[in-house]
Amino acid sequence: PRKPPPLARHREEPPPAETRRFPYGLTTPAGELVAVHTRIEYADGSKRFEWSRNGKLGLAGLAVADVPLWGLKRLAAFDYAADPNCSEPYVILCEGEKAALSLWERVIPAVGTATGASATPSPAVIAALDGKLLYLWPDNDPPGRKHMDAIARLRAADWPFVVTWPDAPPRGDAADFEGDAGAVWDLLVNAVPWEEPPEPAKEVNSEFATHF
């Protein structure tokens, strides 16, 4: 009898090469380090994040919602009196540390959430922004907008504003915005007060719909 053909060996693709690591220290306003959130980028364009605390991987029992916003130490030290555009203390809240850092590089005070779009910082975390005019800069996608909506509900009484960037690419954020500080200020001037988004229309089964 003829022998069956040999089974083809499954050739596993090697994992993509790691290209860069960006460790972001998340601190209290006084500068006390709470956790490190590391962004790891790969050659194929993918990325992942890694938490560490007290020198060990993970958050050691700390809930992600209770991790501080990134940028609080910088914000506490920011000299608003030296900002010619500033009539009152303000801050831009972004999704993620990279977006917030890109604004600091333009000398614009900003903080970033570290929870990811699927989670919301706790009210105590957002309370670190009390006393400041709040601008929300969502990622340009539905999860990003929902993320900022959830935060806005925690600050609804303070009338937060939403930054709108008409030419934003899909999933674009402040890090993708190439304008200088003056261009960012143009966006702030045209920011709109946050409003509760309308509930999506419910689908009605036409078989049981009432017709008038």
Image: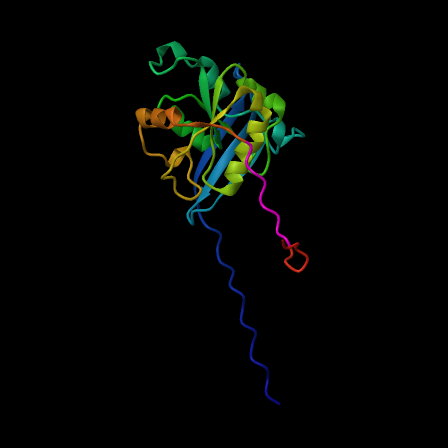
Q: Quadrant of residue 98?
A: top left
Q: Residue 10 in the image: state x and y as whole percent.
A: 54, 66
> How is the structure coloured here?
rainbow
Tell me: residue 46, above or below residue 192. Answer: below
**Of the pair 152 and 51, the residue shown nearer to us:** 152
Q: Is residue 8 one of those drawn in magenta?
A: no
Q: Is residue 201 one of those drawn in magenta?
A: yes
**Of the pair 10 and 60, the residue shown nearer to us:** 60
Q: Is residue 105 visible?
A: no
Quadrant of the image containing the N terminus: bottom right
Q: Residue 40 in the image: state x and y as whole percent.
A: 48, 39
Is residue 23 found left or right of 201 in the rendered image?
A: left
Determine the residue positioned at 59% across, 84% down.
Answer: 3
Tell me: residue 67, above or below residue 1. Answer: above
Q: Residue 21 in the image: state x and y as whole percent.
A: 45, 36
Q: Quadrant of residue 151?
A: top right
Q: Which residues are magenta?
A: 196-204
Is residue 62 found left or right of 10 in the rendered image?
A: right
Q: Is residue 26 visible?
A: yes
Q: Quadrant of residue 116?
A: top right
Outermost residue on the bottom side: it is 1
Is residue 123 found left or right of 145 in the rendered image?
A: right
